Image (tube, helix red, strand yellow):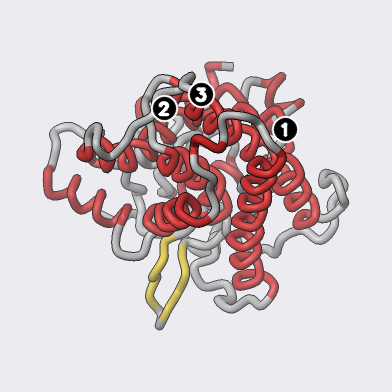
Amino acid sequence: MDKVPVKGWNFAPSVPIQVSPIFTWPWKPYEIVKWIWNSWFLITEKLIVLGLAVCSFYWLQPPLNEMKNLSFDWVLLLYFRNMALMIVVAGALHLYFYTFSKQGLALKYDKRPLMKNGKQFTLGDQIRDNMLWTLGSGVTIWTGYEVLMFWAMANGYAPVLSWADNPIWFIALFLMIPIWESFYFYWIHRMLHIPFLYKHVHALHHRNINVGPWSGLSMHPVEHIIYLGTILIHWVVAAHPVHILFHMQYYTLTAATTHTGFAGLLMKDENRLKLGTFHHQMHHRYFECNYGSLEMPWDKFFGSFHDGTQECDDRIKNGPKIRAASFY
């Protein structure tokens, strides 16, 4: 049942915000199937990123046996491929939603424009600041992790999965990566809100109270190392190179899509491609809530969940701080 959304937003979706039914008891099979379908099909972030990963593997990726030895040739290929992907995805979203304002304020959570001036930004401008940290640090560390993983897989240090080994698990692993991402992201995000790390590392990302496509991967280099360390799970969980590409591109490119500041892309007055979530948008304004994503309800488990309703907002403001704050 829809409730009154929290005040102060240009656009708010139907609330309360729903989390994945996979982790809600008792299980409702229809709701689980519906959630998975809506998350992956027909036109979704996940499916688009999967397509990019497959294309990257077949056309912009050296064979593993050519990556046994570190070489500028293949390392630079990965670097410029990743740079191009980020520029195309974040750049296209920025041009569409902000430069040319093709959608105006429709489905935009916060009606305020991105900041043109601000002492808190490295280059005095939100967009230039975000691009600097995204492309300068983010893409470099993203590529560094890929180089490490592919070199390790080529030399037998990290386990490799093939289609012939287990075709069912080969497909299932694509479905599991976003769930792992939700688990990993919640806990590192909570850690980054410890006062010392927040002040010296995570505060750079939180300069963006009102977010845009370039804000998602705009982080301190230390945070990039922690954030993109998600890929190290594949030193234990066997993967194919295409899984590594999907994992890294999902973590980096959807950082841009989920920070567009818009709920989705309108086509003929319908939201045809869901983008930024209200769940995370509220985190950038309120800070001490919604540390995770909706794939796993960690925020619900640990009392840091803001469901987007005015009732929840009043309860948080008038009562004790969100329980998660006691971790500090």
**Split into 4 quadrants, where in the image is the C terminus?**
top right
Q: Secondary structure at mark 3?
A: loop
Bin the neighbour count of mark 3 within 10 Å (Cα to Cα): few under 14, some 14-19, many 20 and up.
Answer: some
The mark lying in front, picked from 3 and 1, is 3
Q: Position of residue 115 (x, y in %)?
A: 77, 58
Sequence-wise first label, 3 or 1: 3
For the view shown, which residue lies furthest in the bottom direction? 268
Q: Is residue 97 above or below residue 232?
A: below
Residue 173 in view in this figure? yes
Q: Is residue 62 above or below residue 235?
A: below
Residue 303: numbered disc: 2
Q: Which residue appears at 63% of the width and 39% of the height?
A: 143
Q: Are marks 3 and 2 in contact (CB under 8 Å)?
A: no
Identify the amino acid type marked 2: Gly
**C-alpha gap between disc 3 and disc 1:** 28 Å
Q: Which residue appears at 78% of the width and 49% of the height?
A: 132
Q: Position of residue 10 (x, y in %)?
A: 54, 64
Sequence-wise first label, 3 or 2: 3
Q: Are marks 1 and 2 in contact (CB under 8 Å)?
A: no
**C-alpha gap between disc 1 and disc 2:** 29 Å
Which residue has dot 3 on it?
Answer: 155
